[in-house]
Image (cartoon, rainbow, N blue to C red):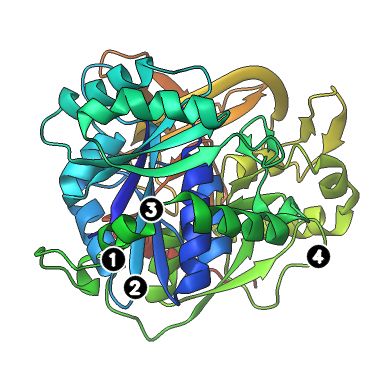
Amino acid sequence: MALIIAGERSGVGKTTVTLALLSCLSRRYRRVQSFKVGPDYIDPMFHQRVTGLPCRNLDPVLTSETYVQACFNLHLHGVDYALIEGVMGLFDGASGRDDVASTAHIARLLNVPVLLVLDCSRLSRSVAAIAQGYRCFDPRIQVAGVVLNRVGSDRHLELLLDSLEPLQLPILGVLRRQDSLTIPDRHLGLVPTDELTFLDQLIDQLADIGETCFNWERLLPLLRAEIHDLTVNSQQLYPCVTQSVTRIAIARDRAFSFYYQDNLDLLQQLGAELVPWSPLGDTTLPEGVQGLFFGGGFPEVFAQELADNIEARQAVWNAIVQGMPTYAECGGLMYLCQQVTDFEEKCWSMVGILPTEAVMGKRLTLGYRQATALQHTPLVLVGERVWGHEFHRSQLTASPEHPLFETKGYDPKGKVGIEGWRMYQLHASYIHLHWGGKTDIPQRFLKCCQQFNPN
């Protein structure tokens, strides 16, 4: 099977528990596959750093229920154990009306049991009411057991165990309060792995904790990777390989690191050669590329370095003006603006293609978006509807004269907005897209790239 790690709410320690399990499993066994519920980019970076295998996002809004099932089963092939990290609280989904896109939704779709993480730092007997409520709320969900996190003392643990005993709910882990065990965070979540110099020591510490804090005799059978009865093959996710090779420059450094692995796999399966380059450190684009791909990330954190690399900014500007097909999401869009104003209200020059500026602020823009294309781009056609996700604290000082998308939130009664830029052969938007089940999107992009001729 596999286990899905759920929390009773956000902030209870799901990621710590998940990383402790993955670190210990990876120390013991060769191949451990992880998954992450929802659209998050940063937690999967930590999973991959621990296991050495790309973490796969499971999001039925961005993709579909069928794609989630197919992706899960495909990536169980050839691995020993599998683990899924949930999102928010167990039943928290895209809206308050139901649990679509929640951890519980994924547990039902994949028919996997739940390991519920409980933050016990301010609880004693009430822990039983919480555990029982979560176990009974949806009888379709199998709660395999609980992990007691942030236990303060032996006496505290004794009170918790006495309270839970009548429920006969397996306690599969106990983690004491670890004030020294912290992963730094910033305005969009955890600090990405490439910025942490102490990450190897942290992984070793988590593995040590995992060795002693979990009931491995009961956990290992639940974690063993077994293919479900769903019929799946790679052709359901990825089209046939093409013979032509298209070189795509992909921005990969500390400023740009938000990419769904499935998107990259799709491009490569379709014949793309992804050539990493750094807008922070490289002064030229890779030789012979026919397209540009800028993912999200933290350009605001590295704005001075990006601004100082005048040669790279000029190279990108020249390529886009010449008509090189370019896809830019969120942080990539910010990099293409006239300038970025950081949290300290300092202004830094960027590429300057988009006639607007990105200004950091306290307001968080967050949520699923249904986007309807108002223009043809290298990726979408007029009238095409796609689901995406926004997550940023910057705002643009000017709106596009001819916007790329008309958008609305997950709630169909939500406010309709406009956003996104289409200039030259550029598709730039705050909206992150997962191309799972939508192979026509990367196919269009690559076809457009193949037609690019700078001369």
Which of these two is toward me, 152 or 9?
152
Kindly identify which residue carries mark 3. 215
Kindly identify which residue carries mark 1. 224
Secondary structure type for disc 1: loop
Q: Amino acid at mark 2?
A: Asp
Task: Report the residue at 72% width, 40% height from top.
Answer: 180
Q: Amino acid at mark 3?
A: Asn
Q: Amino acid at mark 1?
A: Arg
Relative placement, left or right, of 258 versus 40 is right
Which of these two is toward me, 162 or 48?
162
Give the CA distance from mark 2 to mark 1. 6 Å
Task: Quadrant for the N terminus, please.
Answer: bottom left
Vertical arrangement, residue 247 with respect to residue 145, above or below: below
| Among the two numbered marks 4 and 1 on one chain, the one whose residue lies closer to the N terminus | 1
Q: Quadrant of residue 9?
A: top left
| Among the two numbered marks 2 and 4 on one chain, the one whose residue lies closer to the N terminus | 2
Give the CA distance from mark 3 to mark 1. 15 Å
Give the CA distance from mark 4 to mark 1. 43 Å
Secondary structure type for disc 2: loop
Give the CA distance from mark 3 to mark 4. 48 Å
Q: Are marks 2 and 1 in contact (CB under 8 Å)?
A: yes
- 3 or 4: mark nearer the eye: 3
Q: Are marks 4 and 1 in contact (CB under 8 Å)?
A: no
Task: Quadrant for the C terminus, please.
Answer: bottom right
- 3 or 1: mark nearer the eye: 3
Kindly identify which residue carries mark 4. 282
Residue pushed farthest right? 308
Q: How many marks?
A: 4
Kindly identify which residue carries mark 2. 80
| Among the two numbered marks 2 and 3 on one chain, the one whose residue lies closer to the N terminus | 2
Q: Are marks 3 and 4 in contact (CB under 8 Å)?
A: no
Task: Report the residue at 36% width, 15% height from top.
Answer: 126
